[in-house]
Image (tube, rainbow, N blue to C red):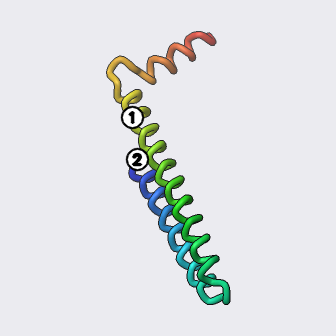
Amino acid sequence: MVSFWWGGMVIAIIAVTFSGIVQIIKVSKTASGSKKLLERIDSLETDLGESEQLLEDAVARIEVLERIVTDDKYSLGKEIDNLAGGRG
């Protein structure tokens, strides 16, 4: 399950990166390309920083969830049984 999330995040980062590269190439072909190129690079660096922070936050949350689920004191089955027993 964790590898699924890692894979998704890696794909998202790659997509953002390639999109940026395509935009950089398009902008560099225009007359005012260098100014737009610098603005685009700044924008991409900001986006990359935000993406890295989101990835770090997601990893931290996954680690917390893994600890909760694998904790010996925590029993999801017992909780479900208690909820089902309360209805009867």
Q: Of the residues shown, which amino acid type is indicated by label 2? A: Val
Q: Secondary structure at mark 1?
A: helix
Residue visible at 42% across and 53% down in the picture: 6
* Closer to the camera in the image, 76 or 4: 4
* The disc label shown at residue 53, or none: none
Q: Quadrant of residue 39?
A: bottom right
Residue visible at 67% across and 89% down in the picture: 31
**The residue positioned farthest toward the right in the image shown:** 31
Up-down: is 77 above or below 11?
Answer: above
Up-down: is 3 above or below 14?
Answer: above
Q: Position of residue 23 (x, y in %)?
A: 60, 77
Count numbered badges in the picture: 2
Q: Secondary structure at mark 2?
A: helix
* Closer to the camera in the image, 55 or 76: 55
Q: Of the residues shown, which amino acid type is indicated by label 1? A: Glu
Residue visible at 57% across and 73% down in the picture: 38
> In the figure, is residue 45 to the left or right of 62?
right
Up-down: is 66 above or below 27?
Answer: above
* The disc label shown at residue 2, or none: 2
* Closer to the camera in the image, 31 or 3: 31
Q: Position of residue 56 (x, y in %)?
A: 44, 46
Q: Quadrant of residue 24?
A: bottom right
Residue visible at 52% across and 63% down in the picture: 45
Distance, label 2 to label 1, CA atoms, is 9 Å
Residue on which the image places disc 1 = 66
Which mark is first along the chain, 1 or 2?
2
Q: How many residues crowd around disc 2 within 10 Å: few (fewer than 14), some, or many (20 or more)?
A: few
* Closer to the camera in the image, 76 or 40: 40
**The residue positioned farthest toward the left in the image shown:** 72
> CB under 8 Å between callouts 2 and 1?
yes
Q: Position of residue 82 (x, y in %)?
A: 52, 13
